[in-house]
Every structure is written in structure tokens, then in C-alpha cells.
Amino acid sequence: MKKVLFISEYLNPPYDEGIKKTVYNLFLDLDDNYDLKVICRHGFEKDNIHIVNTNPLFYSREVKSIIKNFSPESIVYLPFQSSTFASYLRLKVFSFLAKKANIIFIALQPKPIKTWQKVIIRMIKPKVAFTPSPALHTIWNSMGVKNELIPLLTDLSIFKPLADNGKKKSLRLKYNLSAEAFIITHMGHLNEGRNLKTLIPLQKYGVQVVVVGSSSTPIDAYGKETLKDELLNSGIIIIDRYIENIEEIYQLSDLYIFPVVKKNSSIGMPLSVLEARACGVPVLTSNYGSLDFYLDNDYGGIFYSEPEKFLEKFKAIKLELNKDLDKTKVSELNDIFFSSIHKQINK
């Protein structure tokens, strides 16, 4: 088996946020298919996982020793902070410590890069990079970085339609939600960048909007408390705690909604949209990242709109939401992701 070293900052639960889910799902795949070792700052106990205390660039005696003793054929680096300038510097450190290794860079969204930093990145650029973000794909093309646009992974063993539609009512009771209401849900960070105020007109129209916050949302996130109060005062229900079986929230929903438009307020392909569709739930979303590129209308299960016109769009599509929308392209996206990463590792 090929020897692969996987490096990321966080591999520890809970996995309730897009980047952490992607890191964990990629770890599971690499662990199944390769002779794998992991270097991370925060993780869980496993023989092939090394939790290190190192400097910001991951350069330390411990990291050097792990790489030297393992002698990986490929290094896969997925930074939690995505494509920051420091991430490119770390890539250079890894290539220095493992001169013969095939270095693979995966970044989920673009980050601001200064002009002088771009000059350096062009000199130390990765040999190959992957991203689900069309914006980052374009930036890399302009910088001469060899890269490929890829979708993201969804755990289809967890996210799937209810086998018994009668269970939908019992799930609502479990979470103290109305059995009769039309429920629209959203998952993600509770901050201003998520554009959550655009959900208030839907709540006032007579549906029940439920927002499930992420445990990864910083306590001091911009506008969090004021935003939370405004949403609650409108009647929106906020579940601001970790939910172990998050798939149940999708499964009890009539519609999933994704109002994000601001760059870097979500990863380049929102996992929550993929998870909702894997559960057979229709989605009303902004045309964010690579959603339209990979999913289009997903067999009639995805509807696109500017968030300011969500209520108008909802009224227009309401009858369509009663159809069987279980068929989805999500499993095909998993295949594309695996084949892209494996092809590069197996070179």
C-alpha cells in the first residue's frame, strides 16, 4: 500500500462544521485505502494519529522525526484556515522535510492574499492543488498553480432519506418542534456573514424556521448576540448546541435553506446542502460556490434564488416541494472526489 501522510490542524470531534467534516471524511477514506499516518494539532487517540505541539509552520523536531521515519510517498495537506499565506509556507516546509513525497494541497475557500505574498507564492506554489471553490480555482489559475475543481464528500451511510415517512412526526416531537408546521431549516455558524436575517420574512409568512448553530462558531463572532436576539424575536427557533444525530434535523424538515452570499462565509461547496439532498430534502439556496456547477437543479430538488427574494421564490415553488425528491447526484460527487484524490496519490 502507498504510504500517505495526512496533515491538518483539527481531527477532533464534534464534526458539526463543513471543514471539520471534510477533514474527518477524508481521513476515513485515506485510512481505508492507504498506509496512513496523520499529523494534527488536535485529534483523537489512534495508533496512526500523531497529535503534535509545534510552531505555526509545523516545523519542529517531532514533525521532522515523524516524516523522516515514515518516509511518505504522498503528503495530503488540508489546512483548517484554508488558503492563507501561512498555508503555502507550511507546504514548503513539508516539501523540504519530505523531498521525494508527492505534495497535495486541498483548500476549501480563498483567503485574502497581499500582492507581495502572491510573488512569494508563485515561487513556492504547490505542484498540485484541489478546491471546491470556483473563486479559488480562478485565483490559482491566475497565479500559475496547477489545480483542479472538485466537489466534497457526504457520508451517505448517515445522511439518507427516512425509510418510514411516519418517523418524521416522531423526530419533530423529539426536538420539541411542531408536528404540523411547515419547517424550514438552516445549519451553520450564527454570525452576520451567513445572511440569516433574510429568513425572517419566511418566518413571518407563517412557516417555522429553525436555525441550528455550529459549536465551532466563535463566542465573539461578529454580531452574534444581536443577530440571535433579532432572529428569536421574529419567532425563529435557534438550536444553539451540538446535535449528535444531525441527519435527523434534515429528515424532519420540509425544506432546507441556504442564504449565504458573502465570500468566505462558507466553504466553496456547502456540505449542508449536500447533506440535505442526500436526505431527500428539497433545497432553496443562493447560487453559492460550485453548487450549480456540480448539482444544477439536482433532479428538481434544488431551487436557486437571491436571498432577498426567498419568500417570493418559496411561494412559487411550494407545490413542487410535495413531490418525491429523493433522487440526487450527491453519490456521484463522492465518486468524483475519491477518483480525483486517489488518482493523484497513486501516480
Image (cartoon, rainbow, N blue to C red):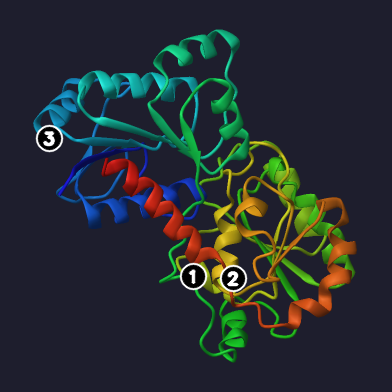
Residue type at the position of mark 2? Tyr
Q: Residue at x 70, y 40 (%)?
A: 193
Disc 2: which residue: 250
Residue type at the position of mark 1? Phe
Disc 2, SS: helix
Horizontal side of 117 relative to 97 (left or right) equals: right
Disc 3, SS: helix
Say if mark 2 contacts mark 3, CB within 8 Å.
no
Q: Point out which mark residue 159 bears.
A: 1
Disc 1, SS: loop
2 vs 3, front mark: 3
Say if mark 1 contacts mark 2, CB within 8 Å.
yes
Q: Is residue 243 visible?
A: no
Q: Residue 165 appears in which quarter of the rendering?
A: bottom right
Q: Earlier in the sequence, mark 1 or mark 3?
A: 3
Q: Residue at x 68, y 47 (%)?
A: 288
Q: Residue 139 appears in which quarter of the rendering?
A: top right
On screen, residue 17 above or below 136 = below
Q: Residue at x 53, y 14 (%)?
A: 118
How far is mark 1 from mark 2, CA to CA? 8 Å
What quarter of the picture does the C terminus occupy?
top left
Give the x, y percent position of residue 312: 90, 63
Q: Residue at x 23, y 55 (%)?
A: 33
